[in-house]
Image (cartoon, grey):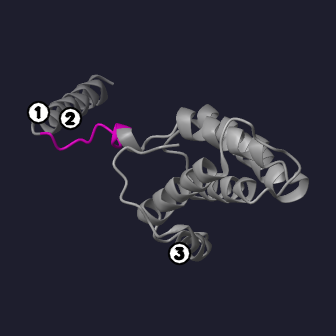
Amino acid sequence: MKKILIILVIILTAITVQTSAAYAQGAVKTGPDLSTLRDADLEKDSLHNLEVARHYFKLKKAYVAAIKRCEEIDAGNPNFAKMDEVLFIAGESSLRLAENRGKQKTKEKTAEQLRQDARVYLSRLVAGYPNSTFLKQAEDDLKDLGGQIKLEGTQP
């Protein structure tokens, strides 16, 4: 029994020493980069807002409401996994409001301001998400709006 206990203590000591040496040399990672981590609750909330914005955009033609949901996601969770769709819905909604389409009207912005907002949203999409499924439509719309703009902290 004493032999087993002595062997067990030696093994545990060796493991502890080896683990300490690995940490001292920086061999053990501390985890993923904090800038890429996503909060599960925030992602869930953002996904819900996206689903509601998608519903407003596609079914209700309530473009003002869709933009507000997208702006909430953009402000609260800029690293959202589906940010390309958020930018697309916001840009398309702004563009359609500028064309007096949809069931809602906005008194806060003129048609030109809405077109500029659409241009900013769609430019952010094209610049930041080259593999997006919405890229082609965004590029086509940007051609009609005067082309992509260079972004330097410009947000509608």
> Is 107 displayed left or right of 84 in the figure?
right
Q: Main secondary structure of the magenta part?
A: loop
Query: Which segment did they paint magenta?
Result: 26-34
At 62% from the left edge and 74% from the top edge, which residue is drawn?
137
Q: Is residue 82 visible?
A: no
Image-quadrant location for residue 88: bottom right
- Residue 4 lies, in percent from the top left, at 30, 30
Image-quadrant location for residue 43: top right
| Helix, strand or loop at mark 3 | helix
> Is 64 displayed left or right of 59 in the figure?
left
Which label's residue is closer to the chain start, 1 or 2?
A: 2
Q: Which mark is residue 24?
A: 1
What kind of residue is marked 2?
Answer: Thr
Q: Is residue 49 visible?
A: yes
- State the CA–CA distance, disc 3 to disc 2: 59 Å
| Helix, strand or loop at mark 1 | helix
- Residue 71 lies, in percent from the top left, at 62, 39
Which label's residue is closer to the chain start, 3 or 2?
A: 2
At 70% from the left edge and 55% from the top edge, which residue is drawn?
98
Picture mark count: 3
User: Are the residues at dot 3 and dot 2 in contact (C-beta closer than 8 Å)?
Assistant: no
What kind of residue is marked 3?
Answer: Lys
Residue of label 2: 19
Which label's residue is closer to the chain start, 1 or 3?
A: 1
| Badge 1 density bin: few <14, some 14–19, many ≥20, Cα 10 Å | few
Residue of label 3: 143
